[in-house]
Amino acid sequence: MTKLSVNINKIATLRNSRGGDVPNVVQFAKDVQRFGAQGVTVHPRPDERHIRYQDAYDLKPEVYTEYNIEGNPVDSFMKLVLSIKPTQVTLVPDAVNAITSNAGWDTLKHKDFLIDIINEFKRNDIRTSIFVDPVLKQIEGAKETGTDRIELYTETFAHQYSLGNKEAIKPYAECAQLASKLGLGINAGHDLSLDNIQFFKENIPNLLEVSIGHALIAESLYLGVENVINMYLHKLK
Ligand SMILES: CC(=O)[C@@H](O)[C@H](O)COP(=O)(O)O
Ligand SMILES: NCC(=O)COP(=O)(O)O
């Protein structure tokens, strides 16, 4: 079975656009777990434009499934994760001003840095995962860092699949096979959706967890809007 971890960054983005507390991110996390999600993911960025550091603390007592905190291990992020002690930390090399994550780690170039950071989290009993492109030598490099898991960066797959190119799964399947052989756990995320998730899952052996945010929230709007319009119409009769 592959676990679904719901990335709730978009809920924070919507809340922040009005400055109040609607929608409430903690309530949303409680609800997705009640509906069956097996994890909650947040990706706090230093500018806190999406999820805020305080949200990550507030979520800690309410996330009774797997709590996954993603981000670039700058000092403030390290401090946050080490004090919350989530189930898993996913290291992502995102630039401060990037709209969203747009590349995996160069695990060869940053090997020593990653080893130090991963050791620190493992000393604190936090499972580690590192965000990587589907490139075999990067998986081998990931193994050298001592990480428990990798997260395959699925943007290219999702884009190519939407264009009808099913061959785009190949490098992911090859990397997953290698990762399994090396004893690395396999997560995946970025732009996974109701359209592509089944095909991805069927072709990736030993897929432990996917984290999904952007598409899942957009799909929830579409799949829920008819119901909400009808509720308004009913009250306006
Ligand atoms: C690590 C990753 O794949 C990203 O998708 C990220 O977690 C999403 O974060 P945003 O919602 O802030 O773009
Ligand atoms: N790690 C990927 C993630 O948390 C969600 O990415 P996306 O579904 O918002 O693209």
Image (cartoon, rainbow, N blue to C red):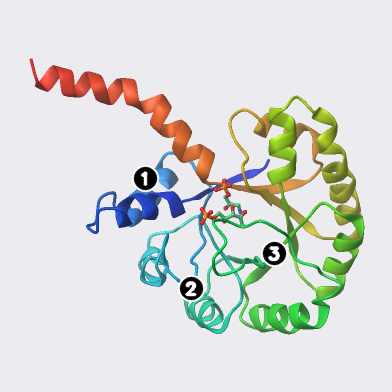
Could you give the CA–CA distance between mark 3 and mark 2, rounded to whole angstroms? 20 Å
Could you give the CA–CA distance between mark 1 and mark 2, rounded to whole angstroms? 27 Å
Which picture quadrant has residue 94? bottom right
**Left or right relative to 216: residue 125:** right
Marks 3 and 1 close (CB-CB < 8 Å): no
Q: Quick one: label 3, few (<14), some, or many (20+) residues within 10 Å?
A: many
What's under tag 3, amino acid-wise? Ser
Mark 2 or mark 1, which is nearer the start of the sequence?
1
Q: Position of residue 156 (x, y in %)?
A: 74, 43
Q: Quick one: label 2, few (<14), some, or many (20+) residues within 10 Å?
A: some
Residue labelled with disc 2: 46
**Left or right relative to 19: residue 188:** right
Q: Secondary structure at mark 1?
A: helix
The residue closer to the viewer here, 1 or 137, is: 137
Residue labelled with disc 1: 31
Q: Secondary structure at mark 2?
A: loop
Residue at 75% x, 77% y: name it. 114
Residue sitting at the far top: 237
Marks 1 and 2 close (CB-CB < 8 Å): no
Q: Position of residue 5 (x, y in %)?
A: 55, 49
Marks 3 and 2 close (CB-CB < 8 Å): no
Image quarter hosting the C terminus: top left
Mark 1 or mark 3, which is nearer the start of the sequence?
1
Residue sitting at the far front: 97
Residue labelled with disc 3: 129
Q: In this picture, is 118 found above or below 194?
A: below
Q: In this picture, is 97 found above or below 109?
A: above
Residue at 74% x, 45% y: name it. 207
Q: In this picture, is 2 found above or below 50?
A: above
Q: Secondary structure at mark 3?
A: strand
